[in-house]
Image (cartoon, rainbow, N blue to C red):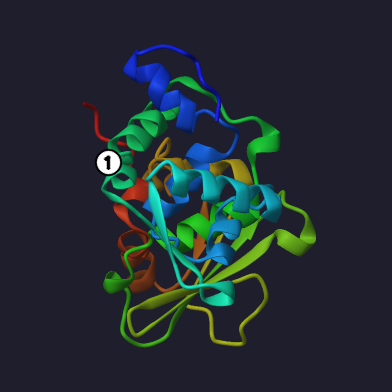
Amino acid sequence: MTDYGQFCPVSKAMEVLDERWTMLVVRELLMGSTRFNQLRRGVPRMSPALLSKRLRRLERAGLLVRFGSGTRTSYQLTEAGRALGPVVDAIAAWGTSWLDLRDDDLDPQFLFFHISRSVPAERWPVARTVVRFVATDARPRSAQWWLVAHRGEVDLCDFDPGYEVDAHVTSDLRTLSLLWRGDLRWERTVRDGAVRVDAPAAVRQALPDWLGHSVLEPAPAG
């Protein structure tokens, strides 16, 4: 770890947190990832070796604990790690307010993985329900994604799961990403044609609730 040689609490915190990827690993743990492969899906551009290194460093710093071994290893934040939740939220709010998305920030795999984790599964029908997303400007192999909800669980597929689709959502990757970040409102993007929804009227009405307020509405001020 970097030693800044200062008693300032900010410098002491940065000795643990300012290495590349560290805060994103903490973000994934805060969002509920407990397994190594789950963490990798949340940081797909991070090498497995570096992820292992960061997890060991967070463990030594007392921010997480590791359980099990081998393929059964899981990770959980300690009280100190969970206390970073408001810090991550504040950084996210600052980034939303002050930083623009670049084209190379637009990653369909990252986007739909995080949408699948953030949707409120309890709001979906008990019967199997499928929403197909098409990112019109993504590469063909990563342009289509399916959310499959069944009995309180939501799974993400990057291939056609073979079930009847209840709603088709079509838009460009930037618009979908801004919706997930909270920069855009669902109702306005649909009304303006930036997002096209092909579904029966009842499904169209329920879809925003299925996807969750955090995906559809701007973050509240203050």
Task: Compare residues 108 and 83 and report the one nearer the observer.
Answer: 83
Whether 21 is drawn above or below 147: the answer is above
Secondary structure at numbered mark 1: loop
Q: Residue at x 37, y 51 (%)?
A: 30
Tell me which corner region of the image, top left, top right, bottom left or bottom right, holds residue 42: bottom right
Q: Is residue 194 visible?
A: no
For disc 1, the marked residue is: 83
Q: Quadrant of residue 205?
A: bottom left
Quadrant where the C terminus is found in the figure: top left
Crowding near the residue tagged with mark 1, few <14, some 14–19, many ≥20 C-alpha atoms within 10 Å: few
Tell me where residue 76 appears, x and y as whole percent: 38, 59
Q: Quadrant of the N terminus?
A: top right
Q: As drawn, is 182 to the left or to the right of 69? A: left
Q: For this view, does 107 lie left or right of residue 116?
A: right
What percent of the width, then of the height, locates residue 23?
48, 38
- Residue extending furthest left? 222
| Number of disc labels | 1
- Determine the residue positioned at 33% across, 33% down: 87
Say what amino acid the circle numbered 1 marks.
Answer: Ala
180 versus 98 height, above or below: below
Q: Is residue 197 above or below residue 2?
A: below
Residue 26 image position (x, y, % from top left): 44, 45
Image coordinates for residue 149, horizontal then vertical, percent: 42, 78
Name which residue lies at 56% across and 52% down.
Answer: 111
Q: Nearer the viewer, residue 80 or 120?
A: 80
Whether residue 137 can be seen here: yes
